[in-house]
Image (tube, grey):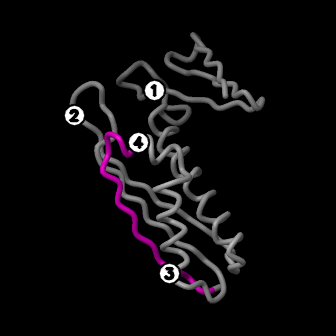
């Protein structure tokens, strides 16, 4: 895996990342740090990537278990250390999984498997952060 980050000097603290798969992602800083608030902060993209990673796992695990999953939303709330390096210290993830006749045990197992075995991002962040998960199932 590879990624190239380029600073865009005319933007203040704007950056463009080009991923190894050929996609682009912009990032920016807060105005008090020289940015213009035109894109997510770099640490927001880390949190978003972690949410995407675990949601991907949960959907895939449920689909492979032949469950009728039709939606998956993950809301993440993170706390960071007060001093540098301001690593994540706590992350709460709440999953809202939509489907037909989804067994709670299957959803709980999919979330656990993601966090214990498959989601590289949350497992990595778990080295500095306490990660708590919760879920609800919506019939639909």
The magenta segment: 126-139
Residue 122: x percent and y percent?
46, 48
Q: Of all residues shown, which one is farthest toward the bottom?
A: 101
- Relative height, residue 125 to residue 118 (above, below): above
User: Foreground mark, 2 or 4?
Assistant: 4
**Dot 2, how many residues are within 10 Å of its Cα: few (below 14), some (14-19), or many (20+)?**
few
Please state which of the two labelled residues, at mark 1 or mark 4, is closer to the viewer: 4
Q: CA distance from mark 1 to mark 4?
A: 22 Å
Mark 4, other Cα within 10 Å: few <14 / some 14–19 / many ≥20: some
Q: Which residue in the protein does label 2 denote?
A: 82
Alpha carbon separation for disc pair 2 and 3: 37 Å
2 and 4 marks in contact (CB < 8 Å): no
Q: Earlier in the sequence, mark 1 or mark 3?
A: 1
Q: Which residue position is annotated with label 4?
A: 125
- The image quadrant that residue 56 belongs to is bottom right
Camera-nearest label, 2 or 3: 3
Direction right: furthest residue: 22
User: What is the number of the mark on residue 69?
Assistant: none
Instruction: Please state if 91 lies on the left or on the right of 35 as rendered.
Output: left
Is residue 58 inside the magenta stretch?
no
Mark 3 or mark 4, which is nearer the start of the sequence? 3
Mark closest to the chain's N terminus, 2 or 3: 2
Give percent across and percent down for residue 26. Answer: 61, 29
Question: Mark 2 vs mark 1: which is more N-terminal?
Answer: 1
Marks 4 and 3, Cα distance to the nearest angstrom? 25 Å
Extreme front residue here? 117
Tally the marks.
Answer: 4
Q: Which residue is mark 3?
A: 105
Q: Residue at x 61, y 77 (%)?
A: 98
From the image, which quarter does the C terminus lie in? bottom right
Q: Position of residue 99 (x, y in %)?
A: 65, 81
């Amino acid at each position: 895996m590879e990624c190239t980050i380029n600073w865009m000097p005319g933007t203040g603290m704007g950056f463009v990342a080009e991923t190894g798969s050929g996609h682009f992602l912009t990032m920016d800083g807060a105005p008090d740090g020289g940015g213009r608030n035109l894109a997510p902060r770099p640490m927001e993209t880390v949190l978003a990537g972690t949410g995407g990673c675990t949601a991907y796992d949960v959907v895939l695990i449920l689909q492979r278990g032949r469950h009728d999953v039709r939606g998956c939303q993950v809301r993440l709330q993170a706390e960071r250390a007060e001093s540098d390096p301001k690593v994540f210290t706590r992350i709460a993830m709440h999953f809202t999984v939509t489907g037909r006749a989804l067994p709670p045990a299957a959803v709980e197992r999919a979330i656990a498997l993601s966090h214990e075995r498959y989601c590289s991002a949350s497992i990595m962040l778990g080295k500095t952060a306490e990660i708590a998960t919760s879920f609800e199932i919506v019939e639909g």
